[in-house]
Amino acid sequence: VDRFARQKAEAKAQAKDLMRQALAAVHRAVAADEGGNASNAYKEYASAVTQFSTVLGSNTLPHLHDQLVQRMDGYLLRMSDLEPEVCEGDTPVVPKFKGRV
């Protein structure tokens, strides 16, 4: 039983660390977006969404589920808005990023 409690505590700590990393990525994305650097903004939004997805998948912070889903929806919408600037071709199904992303 003690081992399971320890594993649960470790998983929760990892999820909180991922949340901190995701929020830092969001701050970088917003700064890049406001600075006109669409490529970096896109990359950072993608990083944040990936980290938020991992937190959701771990189910260690269920009280944040709805908030995370709302945030991710907003970031994905913004990424869609940025795609014409950072993708090549008419349909960015598999985007080819201009420069390094």
Image (cartoon, rainbow, N blue to C red):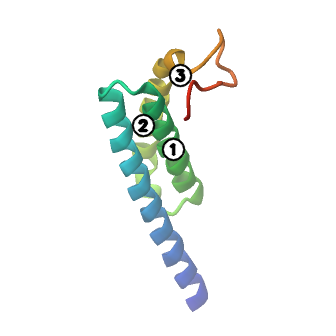
Q: Quadrant of the N terminus?
A: bottom right
Front of the two marks 1 and 2: 1
Q: How many other residues sit within 10 Å of disc 1, few (<14), some (14-19) or many (≥20)?
A: some
Task: Answer whether residue 53 is visible to the viewer in this image.
Answer: yes
Given the image, on which type of amino acid does mark 1 rest? Ser
Whether 64 is drawn above or below 82: the answer is below
Q: Quadrant of the C terminus?
A: top right
Q: Earlier in the sequence, mark 2 or mark 3?
A: 2
Q: Amino acid at mark 2?
A: Gln
Residue 1 visible to the viewer: no
Q: Nearer the viewer, residue 50 or 5?
A: 50
Q: Say which of 67 and 15 sits in front.
A: 15
For the residues labelled 1 and 2, the Cα–Cα distance comes to 16 Å
Looking at the rendered structure, which numbered label has been put on residue 86?
Answer: 3
The residues tagged by marks 2 and 3 sit, at their Cα atoms, a distance apart of: 24 Å
Where in the figure is residue 56, as x and y percent of width and height? 54, 52
User: Which residue is labeled 2 in the image?
Assistant: 70
> Residue shown at 46%/18% (left/top)?
81
Q: Quadrant of residue 20?
A: bottom left
Which residue, as the protein is rendered here, is positioned at the far top?
90
x and y percentages locating residue 77 in the rendered image: 47, 25
> What residue does disc 1 label?
47
- Residue at the limit of the structure toward the bottom, as seen here: 2
SS of the residue under disc 1? helix
**Which-is-in-front pick, marks 2 and 3?**
3
The residue most toward the right is 94
Q: CA distance from mark 3 to mark 1?
A: 15 Å
Which SS class for mark 3?
Answer: helix
Pick the residue in front: 32 or 82. Answer: 32
Q: Is residue 55 left or right of residue 34?
A: right
Do callouts 2 and 3 mark residues in contact (Cβ within 8 Å)? no
